[in-house]
Amino acid sequence: MPLEPEASSAAAFNSGMAAISTVFLTLVGPNSSFVYTTPLYGGTQHLIHQVLEPFGLRGIAAPAGDGEALNRAIDGSRDLRLVFVETPANPTMRMTDIHCAAAAARRHPDRPLVAVDNTLLGPCFQHPLCLGADLAVYSATKYLSGFSDMLAGVVLARDAELVARLRGARALFGNILQPDECWLLDGRLPTVTLRMNRQSKNAQRIAERLVGHPRVERIHYPSLFEDPAQIAIRDRQCKYPGGIFSLELHGGRMAAFEFLRRLTIARNAVSLGGVETLACHPKTTTHSEFSEEELAASGITDGLVRISVGVEDWRDLLRDFEQALEM
Ligand SMILES: Cc1ncc(COP(=O)(O)O)c(C=O)c1O
């Protein structure tokens, strides 16, 4: 059983951003446009604003989870080459319906390709190609490699020709994954399901126990969704809720920083998906390049802390979070 069902071909890159930038620069030519959901991982959104738009590529944003806005953005775009969806979105966990995005792309006269950044729930809990997407894109730096000790990116597709185009561009950009790193990544894949299952179970147990904590205003996590539209997307496209949740703390930035300082097992670092638990403050790190408007529109607030849950004993982690919340 392949890790990404329906994939017939894959290309490895030397980081997730290398994979993502190659997808955009290969598939969206000059004078053409692409639609993307917001928020995206900060680096991807930065790539759009700092590199792609100044090159004359037109990016049309639609808020994650707003199916009507996404349909409008797709229907209203000309010379549309790509629809880029990140679901769940990092760090708010808002989900976008991949099946609906793919259906809108198929209806469009330009027949744009649909790429899904599947870093947060793939390859175990969400399968974009089975839901109609053309490309599944990964930062393999995260769950696929799983130990926060290497950078890598992967793109998979049903259509081998599409991957061949990306490989051609990769040869020009020189952003291929080196052979020893391919070997290292390959050795990590047999345990990705084991690791992700444990991380998802841990995260769910912890997140569901932190709900209602007096210091916690809100928890963004798939098993805790309250919006019926989000629940419907989750139930349709995800097998398990995954290992990432974000805590919205009362008390804004001071409270978030104090919480991060007090953690003893979880480490304050920006990556995710490794076997060790990491926590970070997205507004000042992973998403620090967002404008104030983008931060506000995406719900990336001063009090938001993102947690990537590892494979430690969940009871130890819960105690660590609870003592860090005793501020
Ligand atoms: C959802 C998502 N996509 C892409 C990336 C970029 O990956 P890399 O750090 O491997 O370049 C990240 C990194 O945090 C991410 O979280």
Image: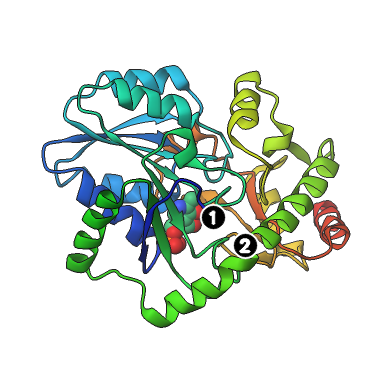
Q: Percent position (x, y) of residue 230?
A: 61, 26
Q: Nearer the viewer, residue 31 or 326?
A: 31
**Residue 14 against residue 254 in the figure, above or below:** below
Q: Quadrant of residue 264?
A: bottom right
Q: CA distance from mark 1 to mark 2?
A: 9 Å
Which amino acid is tagged 2?
A: Val
Q: Residues within 10 Å of mark 2 (few under 14, many from 20)?
A: some
**Residue 302 against residue 32 in the figure, above or below:** below
Q: Which residue is mark 2?
A: 192
Q: Is residue 286 visible?
A: no
Disc 2: residue Cβ within 8 A of ligand 1's nearest atom? no
Q: Quadrant of residue 261?
A: bottom right
Q: Is residue 278 visible?
A: yes
Residues at circles 1 and 2 in contact by the CB criterion of under 8 Å: yes
Q: Residues within 10 Å of mark 1 (few under 14, many from 20)?
A: some
Residue furthest toward the left?
31
The residue shown at (57%, 71%) is 188
In the rendered view, does 215 fall on the left or right side of 249? Answer: right
Tag nearer the camera, 1 or 2: 1
Which amino acid is tagged 1?
A: Leu
Q: Which residue is mark 1?
A: 3
Which is nearer the N-term, disc 1 or disc 2?
A: 1
Q: Secondary structure at mark 1?
A: loop
**Residue 120 against residue 310 in the figure, above or below:** above
Disc 1: residue Cβ within 8 A of ligand 1's nearest atom? no
